[in-house]
Image (cartoon, rainbow, N blue to C red):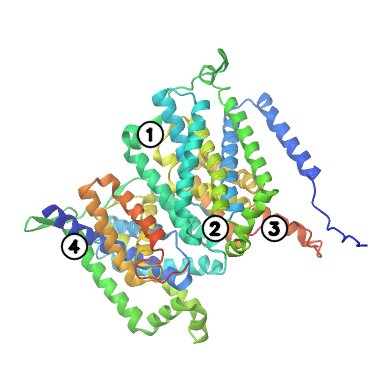
Amino acid sequence: MTVFLQSLISGLLVGGVYALIGIGLTIIFGVMRVINFAHGELVMVGMYITFFAFSLFGIDPFVGIVIVIPLMFLFGAFLQKTFINRVLNALPQNQILLTIGLGLVMSNTVMLLFTSDYRILSTSYSSGSVNLGGISISEPLTISFLITAAITGALYWFLIKTDTGQAIRATAQDRDAAQLMGVNVRRMSVIATGIGAALAGTAGALISPTYYIFPQVGSAFTLKAFVIVVLGGMGSVVGATIGGLIIGVSESLSAAYVSSGLKELFVYVLFLLVLVFKPAGLLGKSRM
Amino acid sequence: MRTPLPLPPKPRGVAAMPLVLGGAVLAVLAVLPLFEKSPYTHHIFILLFLAIIMGEAWNVLGGYTGQYSVGHAAYFGVGAYVTMILLDKHQVAPWLGLWPAIVLSLVVALVIGAITFRLRGPYFVLASIAVAEIFRLIALNWKDLTNGAEGILLVSLPPLVVGGKTLLDVSAMPAEQAKIPFYYAGLGLAVVVIAVNWAVQHSKLGYYFQAIREDQDAAHSLGINLSFWKNLALLISAAFTAWAGSFYALYTGFIDPNNTLTTDVSVQMVLICIIGGIGTILGPVVGALVVVPLSEGLRANFGQVHALVYGILVVLVILFMPDGILGFVKKLATRRPAPAAPTAPPGTEVKA
């Protein structure tokens, strides 16, 4: 029972960060119908910004978020304006290939600049944990989960309450109708991509104290983000939140009960099952 | 009395020009090792042939049938691993081990097809990636069979013995000649795959494929059995991809999950086609001709960054020449004579 609770809790903690990555991907998809295959690379860039902010200027990774969010927002907006915006009406496969190309450019540029060495960001609390009735809870994961929860809450508020948020949701629901109602859909696409990139970068910052940092780390997150988003339903923010938690928990349970080497295998099998039997996801409308 | 309607001019037979040119190129390539002795040149040509084989193999499914698989690493890996495991653990000569490798890749393709062809568009792409990842994780974790992350190192290639006579013994050859058998094997295989693409484009089979690519629902309503033809395209594609994987494994002599089963391998196959011109016979050849020298030149001078070239090239191609280099050149060429009569046979127009 302890093992179960232990893995359930650590799964939920990690799942929160996964949810952040998934929400970013789903917002970008919702507004532009473009699947961002470079999403994991955005996480990776966030990790590197955090790493260098820490190692060069001694900025704590969790404080470093205040640098990561604006930088990544601008980077995302730049990617949208320069590249993605040009393929909005292209075939889906060309959109996919464009973002794959962008991802390759990002990971290889980072490799060129900083080599493919594995880096570790170790803080005083990196391996710290709190013991709660026999269950040890990792300190950095707990902090990152709390920050994730705060950011997710703020994002929900933004999307539901603010004019811009409503405009983004309107664009996601029906791009043409939103445009007819006077929503500046081009601007919303830029903002949505910025938010998506900022969320991915934040997730990168949050996991940097507990993960190896290297240029190719992104592809694993890209795949995970797809699984989360498809599980929750493409374009659904709530779905991505739930999807992230489900994936976090199922990874951690399969690592505890089967083998940590195979935890991703379970995730992909789960993914295929969802694709085949409920392709619209748990909370999404079918877009097939 | 009925007057027969004038028949439209049929595009019959084979145009002589491409055949002559192709034959000339082939003749030059066939005698090249006699004059060019540098193993490095041979190496570059072998990589070029491999890239052509991989691109053309993917092209059957991705280019002609419009099913953008980004999971072809699965078949590449199956080809590489089966050949190497049979050779390393059971001493089965590779020219025999190749066949079980291809058969297994066909079985795998049928299973994968049954799962992924229910899906369309981005969902199909995602599913194909997930399937390839599952194969990578299996190879990584089934250590008894695959040596896991350590990979399999080929100690030496056994000699090719037919009827008691040794025809070829690569491991006994001097180093500067050892690449030549691979050169001819690669060249031969590349010619076969190009011929297969030619046959696909010019046959009824290819018209079914292209109808599915242009509009699945329309094709379905005309009575085309989508899942049958898609699976057939996948089988052709998977067989040659496995062959390429097997060739790669024997040539490099070392395989691990990273060099045979990652998404990068799948992406590379797609990029070769998209850069050259997707759904055309020569597209993958052009793509390989651009990508291989460029990335090898960079690898020699700047180390690991050759994948950067793929990234930059594909971004540029998608933004500025979405029909690939071949499509771009064609567009430039047809810009001058304005009234282009619609004489092209249906389906040959490239839509990338």
Q: Nearer the viewer, residue B162 or B31?
A: B162
Q: CA distance from mark 2 to mark 1?
A: 33 Å
Foreground mark, 4 or 1, reads 1
Q: Quadrant of residue B211?
A: bottom right
Mark number displayed over residue A142: 4
Amino acid type of disc 1?
A: Gly
Are discs 2 and 3 both within one chain?
A: yes
Residue, far front = B1
Number of other residues with Cα within 10 Å of mark 3, as a class: few under 14, some 14 to 19, many 20 or more: few
Number of other residues with Cα within 10 Å of mark 4, as a class: few under 14, some 14 to 19, many 20 or more: some
Mark number displayed over residue B270: none
SS state under label 3? loop
Q: CA distance from mark 4 to mark 1?
A: 38 Å
Number of other residues with Cα within 10 Å of mark 1, as a class: few under 14, some 14 to 19, many 20 or more: some
Q: Taking B127 as reference, is A253 left or right?
A: left
Are discs 3 and 4 both within one chain?
A: no
Asked if labels 3 and 2 touch by Cβ distance under 8 angstroms, the answer is no
Residue position for label 1: B151
Foreground mark, 3 or 4, reads 3
A163 vs A136: above or below: below
SS state under label 2? helix
- Total numbered circles: 4
Task: Give how far across and how far down residue A74 sits, in percent.
Answer: 42, 69
Residue position for label 2: B315
Q: Quadrant of residue A18?
A: bottom left
Residue position for label 3: B349
Q: Look at 36% across and 53% down and name the residue there.
A: A220
